[in-house]
Image (cartoon, rainbow, N blue to C red):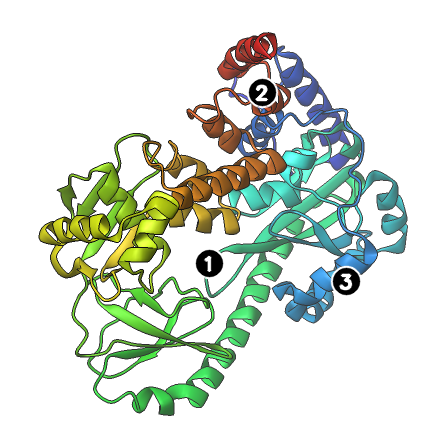
């Protein structure tokens, strides 16, 4: 028996298309294929089918209107290299009866230029500006697949999962942000299947590399401008360790003798960040970045970690050492974390007991708490002097940033369910409403499933009904969710 045939994109494009049609039909039907598809294609087909892409689906509808698209284009970093792309690709694409397509990192087509005849043929099948061509939307295609595999990809005729695009051939390469290394988009050349040529892949690959080089040069120029403008201010930071950061947190320069990592996670709204060695760095926002200073005389603050969203038994530690907490002491620490500027005994009594609160009782509790934690709890007013890590605040921050996986992972139980504090009860009610609204609005399986498995989510009929619609029947959780949903309806 001879060696198995290997598909090569150097063959006659029409004959190759006919072979690929037989290969695709055989693979999708589960029958024997005349030759195995290329690995990059078979893996993409598998991912696309898992994502429920219909091989007979219709062309995509626009996800951006003309006005919205114009604004997105203006902000996108690839707008800066569009003249380079035009000079490199559009002329070649036009002469070779192709179009050049540029997408963002999500596979949305931002620009399409080239042969007018090909543009007219591309419009009816959705190869147009403002449409989404990610793998999860349109299955195997050069633009979407290159963004997944982070490598140049060529897709010919029936290698496209969706049958509509079997008359097309395309090649694409990803483009990376020279600052962060993240993919910011893809460059693609697309045309009728008869125009397929193996050199197209090399062409888009080289063009993507040229685009990255251009972006890297622009980044270097921006870095030099930032250094020139703020190095004098960095030099005036006395004997304190200090560093100049780009807007993305990359350390651009530092005072001689001070050591910094290559990159720091800085948020413009915060006044200080904690370094890996426990020191606090003061953050000064600049129009084009940040200036960080570490005061020499600052004493490292202890780390107080509180896990209050874990049900009846809160978890706490101080500098990594476990702390046993009663409900009352957990209430005090939770309230002091909510009011970092401090509270009086009278205010704490009101927050914990309501109008019947007794400040004397609070003072006694604070005294016992200080005997365990020392100066972590300051007086006049009562406040925390520590690096405080509280899951309640982390969940709220995650919700603000849309990080639902983090929020649902941390929020495994109610906030101190044994507490009768009106303030903490209100905090929990607001957090639960916000979390539930977020997971239902986003409609993602992961956060919805996590929410449904908690004590506060297991009886939420709307959550389970949404999961029934989202989970594919092949998912083992689908049967469990269906049964639970039926029980909740029966009890309703």
- Image location (x, y in percent) of residue 285: 44, 76
| Vertical relation: 130 (above or below) 216 | above
* Front label number (2 vs 1): 2
| Vertical relation: 146 (above or below) 265 | above
In the picture, measured across the screen, residue 358 lies left or right of residue 445, that is: left
Of 213 and 384, nearer the camera is: 384
| Vertical relation: 377 (above or below) 365 | below
Q: Which residue is mark 2?
A: 461
For the view shown, which residue lies furthest in the left direction?
371
Q: Give the residue displayed 59% in from the left and 7% down from the top.
A: 490
For mark 1, does the 10 Å Cα neighbourhood hold few (<14), some (14 to 19), or many (20 or more) residues?
few
In the picture, measured across the screen, residue 283 lies left or right of residue 113, that is: left
- How far is disc 3 from disc 2 in space, using C-alphas? 42 Å
For mark 2, does the 10 Å Cα neighbourhood hold few (<14), some (14 to 19), or many (20 or more) residues?
some
- Image location (x, y in percent) of residue 376: 18, 58
Q: Which residue is mark 3?
A: 70
Of 278 and 16, nearer the camera is: 278
Of 110 and 309, nearer the camera is: 309
Residue 129 visible somewhere in the drawing = yes
Mark 1: secondary structure: loop
């Amino acid at each position: 028996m001879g060696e198995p045939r290997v598909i090569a994109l150097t063959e006659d494009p029409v004959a190759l298309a006919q072979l690929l049609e037989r290969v695709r039909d055989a693979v999708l039907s589960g029958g024997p294929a005349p030759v195995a598809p290329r690995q990059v294609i078979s893996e993409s087909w598998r991912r696309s089918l898992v994502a429920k892409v219909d091989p007979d689906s219709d062309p995509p509808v626009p996800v951006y209107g003309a006005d919205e698209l114009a604004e997105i284009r203006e902000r996108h970093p690839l707008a800066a290299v569009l003249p380079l792309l035009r000079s490199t690709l559009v002329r070649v694409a036009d002469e070779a009866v192709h179009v050049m397509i540029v997408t963002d990192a999500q596979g949305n087509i931002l620009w399409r230029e080239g042969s007018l005849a090909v543009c007219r043929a591309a419009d009816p099948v959705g190869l147009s500006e403002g449409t989404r061509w990610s793998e999860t939307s349109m299955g195997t295609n050069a633009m979407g697949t290159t963004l997944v595999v982070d490598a140049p990809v060529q897709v010919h005729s029936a290698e496209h999962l969706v049958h509509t695009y079997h008359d097309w051939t395309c090649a694409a390469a990803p483009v990376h942000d020279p600052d962060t290394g993240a993919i910011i988009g893809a460059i693609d050349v697309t045309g009728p299947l008869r125009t397929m040529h193996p050199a197209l892949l090399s062409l888009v690959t080289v063009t993507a590399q040229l685009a990255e080089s251009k972006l890297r040069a622009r980044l270097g120029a921006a870095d030099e401008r930032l250094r020139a403008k703020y190095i004098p201010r960095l030099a005036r930071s006395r004997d304190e360790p200090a560093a100049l950061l780009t807007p993305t947190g990359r350390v651009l320069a530092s005072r001689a003798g001070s050591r910094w990592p290559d990159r720091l996670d800085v948020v413009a709204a915060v006044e200080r960040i904690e370094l890996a060695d426990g020191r606090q760095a003061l953050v000064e926002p600049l129009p084009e970045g940040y200036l960080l200073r570490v005061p020499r005389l600052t004493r490292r603050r202890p780390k107080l970690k509180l896990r209050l969203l874990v049900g009846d038994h809160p978890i706490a530690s101080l500098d990594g050492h476990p702390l046993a907490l009663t409900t009352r002491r957990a209430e005090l620490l939770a309230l002091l974390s909510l009011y970092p500027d401090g509270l009086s005994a009278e205010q704490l009594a009101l927050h914990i007991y309501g109008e019947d609160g007794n400040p004397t009782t609070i003072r006694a509790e604070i005294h016992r708490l200080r005997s365990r934690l020392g100066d972590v709890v300051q007086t006049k007013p009562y406040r925390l002097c520590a690096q405080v890590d509280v899951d309640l605040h982390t969940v709220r921050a995650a919700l603000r940033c849309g990080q639902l996986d983090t929020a649902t992972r941390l929020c495994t139980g109610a906030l101190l369910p044994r507490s009768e504090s009106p303030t903490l009860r209100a905090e929990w009610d607001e957090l639960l409403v916000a979390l539930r609204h977020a997971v239902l609005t986003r409609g993602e399986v992961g956060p919805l499933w996590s929410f449904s498995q908690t004590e506060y989510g297991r009886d939420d009929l709307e959550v389970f009904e949404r999961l029934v619609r989202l989970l594919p029947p092949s998912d083992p959780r689908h049967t469990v969710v269906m049964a639970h949903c039926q029980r909740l309806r029966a009890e309703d």
